[in-house]
Amino acid sequence: MKILLLVSNADTKAGSGRNVATISAVLRDAGHEVTVLAYTKGFWRFVREVRKRAKTNDIVQAIDINPVGLPGYLATRFTKAKFIIIAQAAYAIAPLYSRKAALLSRIVYRGADAVVAGSSFVAQEIQKKVPGLEVSVIDPGIDMSKFSDVANTGKHTARTDPYIIGVGAVKARKGYDVSLRAFALLKADFPRLRYVIVGSQTDEPLYFSMLTELARELGVGRDVDFLANVPDAGLNELYDRASVFVLTSVNLGFHFEGFGMVFLEAAAHGLPSVGTLGNGIADAVEDGTTGILVPQHDPEATARAIRTILTDTAKAERMSIRARAFAREHDLPHLTRCYEGLYRDIFTS
């Protein structure tokens, strides 16, 4: 089958970009011919380019409504190509609340041969504005062959150099100010505990500056390590040696955590997680079994969750074992089966 994948950005440094790369890889490995086409300025020029390619493809698959959904919809009208929308996060939702774009966005959603959300939260948010729309959920997949299969026995026994880790671009939506305050609340009882934050520091430089100043004000400036441009091998080592993964993402307008690939990566390392409620993280973390979910903007609840994992070693070990099993459930063969099942459905319906 020939598949044209429309994307706004294929940068694999971001979770959405890694998801696109993963989808492309599993479909190619399954024998499909996949072409990735990134959006270029000039709306109608892009529509014409997509339409030209749609005539020789079986499926046109758009990642989110903005900016490639409408061009994909228009370009596939009156062609044999099936049109699918993969709704990942903000750019799948925000247009539905725009006075200028809401009507067109609803038309595009209803006109698609299939709509797939990257989490239950994203599916529910779409259905709020497009009532009755059928939305399938296919969680992102992870290549487990890239992660060590060594058992995690003993990972949560007492350590002389414990640290918690957060991974993701340093920007307000990731809620690092919340987790930093939670970390400060723990320092009296865990004086050797450190906090390692891995991610780009240039996305929101003012927020990064605010965080470093906040760390100093809270008295933990020397206990927090901000790391950028960490290669995959180095990141894997950081995951392996950490005690808890923490990312207290917050919803800012229509910008929210659509799923949270980093939680799945942490799980692949057998690392229990602390995340937030009210976004797509609920699909990436099984609350109480692979980690703990807390309310957004709540340093105290975050600190309690981290404390539980640090002090209840038996529970942490159970979470570690279940986390790795959970990650295996999202291995690439599962993702392949989901998409091939979707394709069969739209061609036989």
Image (cartoon, grey):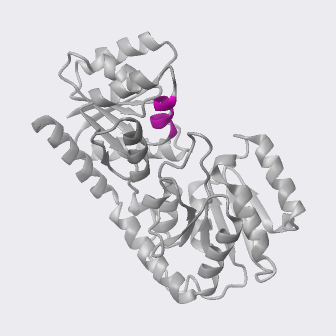
Magenta part of the protein: which range? Answer: 90-97
Identify the residue at image location x=60%, y=88%: 157
Identify the residue at image location x=28%, y=39%: 132
Residue 126, position as x, y percentages in the image: 40, 40
Residue 149 visible in the picture: no
Identify the residue at image location x=34%, y=26%: 108
Quarter of the figure with the N terminus:
top left
Which quadrant of the view contains residue 125?
Answer: top left
Residue 87, position as x, y percentages in the image: 40, 39
Identify the residue at image location x=61%, y=60%: 247
Please, what is the dominant secondary structure of the magenta stretch?
Answer: helix
Which quadrant of the view contains residue 301?
Answer: bottom right
Compared to residue 138, the image places residue 266 above or below, namely below
Q: Is residue 258 magenta?
A: no
Does residue 31 appear left or right of residue 96 in this picture? left
Does residue 100 appear left or right of residue 252 in this picture? left
Residue 26, position as x, y percentages in the image: 31, 47
Front residue of 217 and 168:
217
Front residue of 24 and 295:
295
